[in-house]
Image (cartoon, helix red, strand yellow):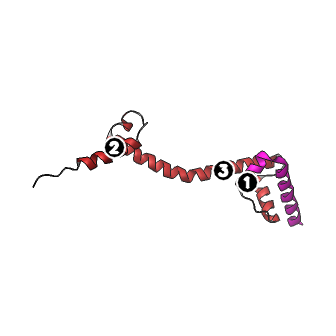
């Protein structure tokens, strides 16, 4: 019986990897072995960074809220505590957006938090 070679399937599989590695530097975009290693690593980075992006944005929102609340002589943690005492349910993304784009409305949130803290301390 004749030996069967899988050249068509092998060529397709390798072309798929090379196509994914398009634009990579030197041999990582042309040689199959290094391209395959780099594509696998790139997929791992992409998976990891999809998770990291969520963390990074949350950190950014917290920094923006903290900066805006310090303009009103209040720390971020005090603001969040005061808003929870007041029963205000707003996420950090929206609060950061309000802090940047609508400082007057943000000042009202700060006042609400201050009042709630004052009531709780009595």
Magenta segment's dominant SS is: helix
Using the rendered image of the protein, determine whether residue 65 is visible from the camera's viewpoint.
no
Mark 1 against mark 2, which lies toward the viewer?
2
Q: Are marks 1 and 3 in contact (CB under 8 Å)?
A: no
Q: What residue appears at the point 23 percent right and 47 percent down from the top-left corner?
A: 7
Label 1 and label 2: CA atoms lie apart by: 45 Å
Q: What residue appears at the point 80 percent right and 65 percent down from the top-left corner?
A: 85
The tag earlier along the polypeptide, 1 or 3, is 3
Q: How many marks?
A: 3
Q: What residue appears at the point 83 percent right and 51 percent down from the top-left corner?
A: 105
The magenta segment is 97-122
Q: Secondary structure at mark 2?
A: helix
Label 1 and label 3: CA atoms lie apart by: 14 Å
Q: Secondary structure at mark 1?
A: helix
Residue 98 falls inside the magenta stretch: yes
In the picture of the structure, the residue carrying the numbered disc 1 is 94
In the picture of the structure, the residue carrying the numbered disc 2 is 15
* Circle on res. 59: 3
x then y, percent, for residue 17:
36, 45
Label 3 and label 2: CA atoms lie apart by: 40 Å
- When the figure is inspected, residue 18 is found, relative to residue 65, above or below; the finding is above
Side (left or right) of 56 relative to 97 = left
Find residue 109 and report its image quarter: bottom right
């Amino acid at each position: 019986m004749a030996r069967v070679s899988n050249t068509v399937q092998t060529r397709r599989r390798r072309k798929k990897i090379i196509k994914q590695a398009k634009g990579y530097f030197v041999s990582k975009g042309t040689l199959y072995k290094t391209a395959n290693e780099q594509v696998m690593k790139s997929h791992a980075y992409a998976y990891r960074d999809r998770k990291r992006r969520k963390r990074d944005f949350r950190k950014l929102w917290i920094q923006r809220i903290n900066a805006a609340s310090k303009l009103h002589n209040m720390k971020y943690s005090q603001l969040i505590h005061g808003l929870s005492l007041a029963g205000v349910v707003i996420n950090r993304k929206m609060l950061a957006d309000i802090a940047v784009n609508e400082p007057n409305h943000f000042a009202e949130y700060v006042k609400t938090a201050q009042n709630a803290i004052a009531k709780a301390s009595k």
